[in-house]
Image (cartoon, rainbow, N blue to C red):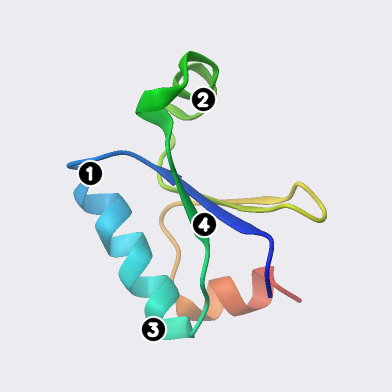
Amino acid sequence: MSGLVLYGTTYCHLCEDAEAVLNEAGVSAAYIDIADDDGLIERYGTLIPVLRRSDTGAELGWPFDAGMVMRFLV
């Protein structure tokens, strides 16, 4: 599925773990570093990593595993 965004930031070990989970699930997502946007920091600062569907706006917050990601995409 295209249209996935993973919100995170540099030096976030949980964000690295989330990327590994996406790879395990065979899913790709655009990565957006929230540090570049004050609005994103305010919205996601304590929640990252967050996986977001662009089509529905639904969000999947950490922690998640490959199975949860696959169910999120259905």
The residue carrying mark 3 is 24
The disc labelled 1 sits on which kind of residue? Cys
Q: How many angstroms separate mark 1 from mark 3 (CA)? A: 19 Å
Quadrant of the image containing the C terminus = bottom right
Residue 27 in the image: state x and y as whole percent: 52, 77
Q: Earlier in the sequence, mark 3 or mark 2?
A: 3
- Quarter residue 36 falls in: top left
Q: How many angstroms separate mark 1 from mark 4 (CA)? A: 16 Å
Q: Earlier in the sequence, mark 2 or mark 1?
A: 1
The disc labelled 2 sits on which kind of residue? Leu
Q: Marks 3 and 1: in contact by CB < 8 Å?
A: no
Count of all numbered marks drawn on residues in the image: 4
Quadrant of the image containing the N terminus = bottom right
The residue carrying mark 1 is 12
The residue carrying mark 2 is 40
Q: Which disc, if any, is residue 30?
A: 4
Q: Earlier in the sequence, mark 1 or mark 4?
A: 1
Residue at the right extreme, as displayed = 56
> What element does badge 4 sit on?
strand
- Quarter residue 72 falls in: bottom right
Q: Earlier in the sequence, mark 1 or mark 3?
A: 1
